[in-house]
Image (cartoon, grey):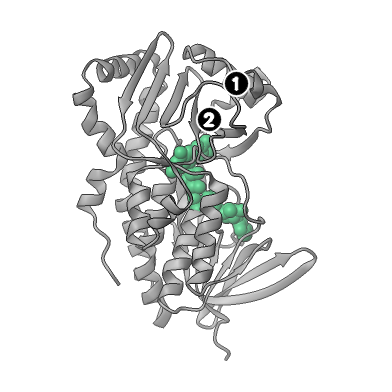
Amino acid sequence: MSAPDWDVIVIGAGPAGALAAHQLASYRLRVLLVEKRAFPRWKICGSCLNGVALRALEQAGLGHLVDDLGAASLERIRLGLPGLQVELALPAGRSLSRGRLDLALSEAAVAAGAVLYAQTEATVAGTCPGGREVLLRSGAGLQTTSARVVLVATGLGSPGLAADLPIRMRINPRARIGAGCELDAGVKGYGGGTIHMAIGRHGYVGLVRNEAGALNLAAAFDRPQLIAAGGPAASAADVLAEAGFDPLPQLAAAPWRATPALTRRSTPPAAERLLLLGDAAGYVEPFTGEGMGWALVGALAVVPLVLQGQSEWSRGLERQWARRHALRIGTRQRFCHGLAFALRRPGLSRTLLAAAGRWPAAAAPLLQHLDGATLQRSTPEPCP
Ligand SMILES: Cc1cc2nc3c(=O)[nH]c(=O)nc-3n(C[C@H](O)[C@H](O)[C@H](O)COP(=O)(O)OP(=O)(O)OC[C@H]3O[C@@H](n4cnc5c(N)ncnc54)[C@H](O)[C@@H]3O)c2cc1C
């Protein structure tokens, strides 16, 4: 009986996978990190790191990356609804392009000892003695490898699981579609240091200057209106106009990309020698810009279970991960889901925003909650 090839295989080198690979390699485990794309790559994301994300990076010893990569500071959020605009101070926040962040995180994982197979697509297969098998496809080449524990951090796309695994992904039938593009630094308006958030009846558009001054757009739209408007450029133009934001004629020619439906959950987020994290475990609409924070917190939280699973696997580890995930991330996601629900009701969101604009001190605790200060204080990570 041969031992598995690796202690851990991590599939997907986004923030969740790359940070988990970094942490596990730091424990001298034999870690294989598999990524289907070539880095650096552009990715649909608001590119805003909130307090949760920044603290998770610090906790992992990688807080310096944000300064090293020249992330822009975010001081304010400007929210626009039809006939109402409000500007509020942000407790914390940096803007950093995903191309640079994800490349730096995967390089940190390799520096810690992980082996990276880039441009390789992985599919989780069945179990083998003491481990789980993974199929790797790179160009025309196909090979099978195995690990004691496999982490799936594949983001919003297909999680790459064999059909007979008892994990089902449920997609909210009303889930919005994500879309995004980047406009070059020469575009006028939408100054730096501010998250500009335009909220329309059928979606919202977030605009932020990144570390190079480029204007990053990330949006979520109702599917029927996206189709009716003729695509993301027209939908974004409609939302900007509704919110009273300046038009951006460059949107029509920009290289837009879209995501699959956003709000989803994988249940359970674990199976034998297999744990799901980041967006692959579950995601809600990105209004509060927390996804990277959830991904990074998940990467830190999964480490003790992977270490325990090295000697022996038990169903208890799967249950622990489901509980831990629900507590650390599910609670926050439900809160954001509630906020997204409120924002779909124009009367309610107008009342909330008008109140926040009139009494900024009363809105501060909500912003701090969104920033994760409460979460971070109440759930410190145990050291394995
Ligand atoms: C419109 C929008 C705006 C957002 N704005 C923000 C924001 O401002 N701030 C914030 O914190 N979050 C934001 N998010 C959320 C954030 O982008 C995600 O939550 C975050 O990227 C999740 O990280 P992850 O590592 O789970 O997945 P990802 O970052 O998606 O990484 C998954 C990786 O896995 C790879 N992969 C997939 N399948 C395979 C396979 N079979 N084999 C090998 N590799 C594979 C992919 O190529 C990818 O690199 C936004 C999301 C959207 C849609």
Please tell me which residue is depicted at 54% across the width and 76% down the height of the picture: 147
Q: Secondary structure at mark 1?
A: helix
Question: Is residue 257 in view?
Answer: yes
Q: Which residue is at the front of the view, 246 or 239?
A: 246
| Vertical position of residue 186 compared to residue 41: above or below | above
| Amino acid type, label 2 | Ala
Residue 155's tag is none
User: Split into 4 quadrants, where in the image is the N terminus?
Assistant: bottom right
Please tell me which residue is depicted at 52% across the width and 33% down the height of the picture: 173
To which residue does mark 2 refer? Answer: 219
Callout 1 crowding tier (Cα within 10 Å): few <14, some 14–19, many ≥20: many
| Vertical position of residue 25 compared to residue 194: above or below | below
Q: Is residue 328 left or right of residue 294?
A: left
Residue farthest to the bottom, as pictured:
1
| Amino acid type, label 1 | Ser
Q: Are marks 2 and 1 in contact (CB under 8 Å)?
A: yes
**Disc with the residue nearer the chain's start (2 vs 1):** 2
Callout 2 crowding tier (Cα within 10 Å): few <14, some 14–19, many ≥20: many
Residue 235's tag is 1
Q: Specify whether tag 2 is near ligand 1 (CB below 8 Å).
A: yes
Q: Which residue is at the front of the view, 238 or 168?
A: 238
Residue farthest to the right, as pictured:
140
Q: Secondary structure at mark 2?
A: strand
Q: Is residue 213 left or right of residue 290?
A: right
Distance (Cα) linking label 2 and label 1: 9 Å
Q: Position of residue 198 (x, y in %)?
A: 46, 21
Question: Is residue 264 in view?
Answer: no
User: Split into 4 quadrants, where in the image is the C terminus?
Assistant: bottom left
